[in-house]
């Protein structure tokens, strides 16, 4: 099937419902990509934070000064 110049330059208009569905589909794809990127970044940062975490040494106990 070949496209004529009328079909190419004057495409049929989409119905309001079809246009809304197309918009929703694009938005869902964008949001899914952003969510995946955010979760990936969060996991990466969490792994780095856990790798850096070192337990703090316990504070040294001070001895009582004895009267001389």
Image: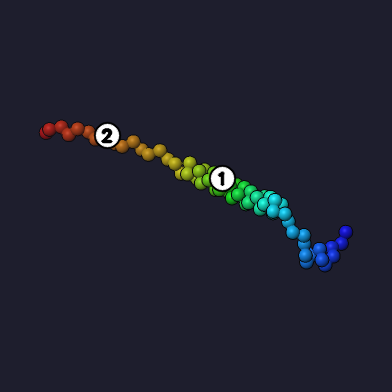
Name the side, left or right, on which 67 lies relative to 63: left
As displayed, is residue 6 above or below residue 44?
Answer: below
Q: Which residue: 50% across, 43% down? A: 46
Task: Say whether disc 2 or disc 1 marks the residue closer to the N-terminus.
Answer: 1
Residue 16 seen in the figure:
yes
Q: Which residue: 54% across, 44% down? A: 43
Residue 2 or 7: which is nearer the viewer? 7
Residue 23 or 30: which is nearer the viewer? 23
Which quarter of the figure is the N terminus placed in? bottom right
The extreme left residue here reads 68
Query: Which residue is label 2 attached to?
Result: 61
Estimate the x, y position of residue 6 in percent, counting from the top left.
Answer: 82, 66
Residue 55 or 14: which is nearer the viewer? 14
* Few, some or many residues within 10 Å of mark 2 (<14, 14–19, 20+): few
Query: Which residue is label 1 attached to?
Result: 39
Q: Which residue: 71% across, 52% down? A: 18
Estimate the x, y position of residue 8 in percent, counting from the top left.
Answer: 79, 64
Name the side, left or right, on which 6 lies relative to 48: right
Marking on residue 58: none
The extreme right residue here reads 1
- Please name the colour scheme applied to the rendered image: rainbow
Question: Label 1 near label 2: C-beta < 8 Å?
Answer: no
* Few, some or many residues within 10 Å of mark 1 (<14, 14–19, 20+): few
Q: CA distance from mark 2 to mark 1?
A: 43 Å
Residue 44 or 2: which is nearer the viewer? 2
For the residue labelled by badge 1, is the local secondary structure a helix, a strand or a loop? helix
Name the side, left or right, on which 13 lies relative to 35: right
As displayed, is residue 2 above or below residue 22?
Answer: below
Estimate the x, y position of residue 33 in percent, counting from the top left.
Answer: 62, 50
Q: Which residue: 63% across, 51% down? A: 27
For the residue labelled by badge 2, is the local secondary structure a helix, a strand or a loop? loop
């Amino acid at each position: 099937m070949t496209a004529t110049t009328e079909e190419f330059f004057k495409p049929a208009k989409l119905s309001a419902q079809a246009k809304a569905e197309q918009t929703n589909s694009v938005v869902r794809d964008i949001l899914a990509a952003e969510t995946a990127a955010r979760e990936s970044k969060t996991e990466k940062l969490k792994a780095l934070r856990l790798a850096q975490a070192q337990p703090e040494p316990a504070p040294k106990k001070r001895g009582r000064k004895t009267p001389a």
